[in-house]
Image (cartoon, rainbow, N blue to C red):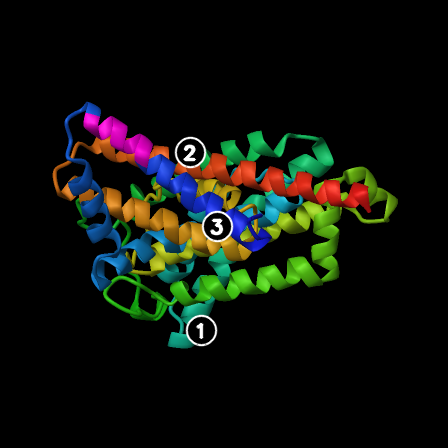
Amino acid sequence: MAIPVWLRLPGAFVLSVLLGMTASSVVLVAVHAPVLETFRAIFDGAVGSWSALESSLVFAEPIAFTGLAAAVAFRARVWNIGGEGQMVMGAFGAGLIALNTSLPAPLMLLAVLACGILCGALWAFLSAALKVWLGVNEVLSSLMLNYVAILWVQSLVYGPWREPGGGWPYSAYFADEARLPSLGSELDICVVVAPVLALALSILLRFSRWGFEVTVVGHSHEAARYAAISVTWITILVMLVSGALAGIAGVQQVSGSAGRLYVLTPGYGYLGILVSWLAGHDPLLVLIMAVFYGILMQGGAALQIAQIDPSLVRVIQAAIILFALAGLTLARRSQSRMHLGKVDRA
């Protein structure tokens, strides 16, 4: 009996994760590590309690935003690898307002968000401008700008924005008015904002003229030009949206539980790229994959707390992700071939 279409991708994902766990088990056996105890520790540490699940969602929050940022750009075949730098500039924008202005409660948070989003978008615009007007490859420019952003914020938190008398490279704490509303001990309002944005992006990409134009540009620049769609305009626009979404991740990192500016180098921008590919650049699936990766990260942290070799943690995470990426890619290619076969028969 043929597998229903709506079950093929979820089935491929589950099977791929199981194969990744099997491959990880072989490594664990080879180094004489307890297999069942290791996977039980991952489960208990990531989803075994509400506090564990909350910690997994904390990891998933910024990955969801950088994943959405990557998905928007990649759907238009614009290879924005600068989510990390755009996230850092979003954090800078939040700190610029929080540390240097004094506004009433509602206006302060709105200004922090607006400045963070604007800084992320403008940082992405640099790569877009270099691409469309000077022909500079956006992969290289956006990647290099990551390091510029990190060094810029580093110069601030080690220099003029460093907390007076502080021993660590952090800014002073933000005022309460500049902090995101909390929804728990670690979670903030962004855990609700991310699904709303993903749904809005999904609707726009599927049903709006802009979404249609993004799809056409992503499939063929020649077809887009034939249909009188401006590739230049779409490239700039998707990069602005992509940078803005990454900027939200930066605001969340410093205006959330941290409450102050610091040097952000967690790799969330690069993880967003991976999550977007796992999700096939579908905004709603990005959320699911972000939570999945958050669970892996929290499970890995739990293993380290349980004093399991950190290198084994990396092996388990890498094996599961590689098998999942390969399995989903093959499943999507199979679906595409079947669809083309049906079109040819018709």
Magenta stretch contains residue 24: yes
| Residue bearing the label numbered 2 | 322
Q: Which mark is residue 26?
A: none
Q: Residue 107 carries which label?
A: 1
Q: Is residue 148 above or below residue 103?
A: above
Residue ranking furthest to the front: 1
The x, y position of residue 65, in whole percent, is 46, 53
- C-alpha gap between disc 2 and disc 1: 44 Å
| Point 47% across, 40% down: residue | 274
Q: In this view, does 104 lie above or below 48?
A: below
| Point 52% across, 52% down: residue | 7
Q: Residue type at mark 2? A: Leu
Q: Is residue 75 visible?
A: yes
Q: Is residue 335 above or below residue 5?
A: above
Q: Residue type at mark 1? A: Leu
Segment colored magenta: 22-29
The x, y position of residue 42, in whole percent, is 23, 46
Pointer 1 local density, CA inside 10 Å: few below 14, some 14–19, many at least 20? few
- C-alpha gap between disc 3 and disc 1: 43 Å
The x, y position of residue 174, in whole percent, is 30, 62
Pointer 3 local density, CA inside 10 Å: few below 14, some 14–19, many at least 20? few
Q: What element carries label 2?
A: helix
Mark 2 or 1: the one toward you: 2
What's the magenta bit mostly, secondary-structure-wise?
helix
Mark 2 or 3: the one toward you: 3
| Residue bearing the label numbered 3 | 10
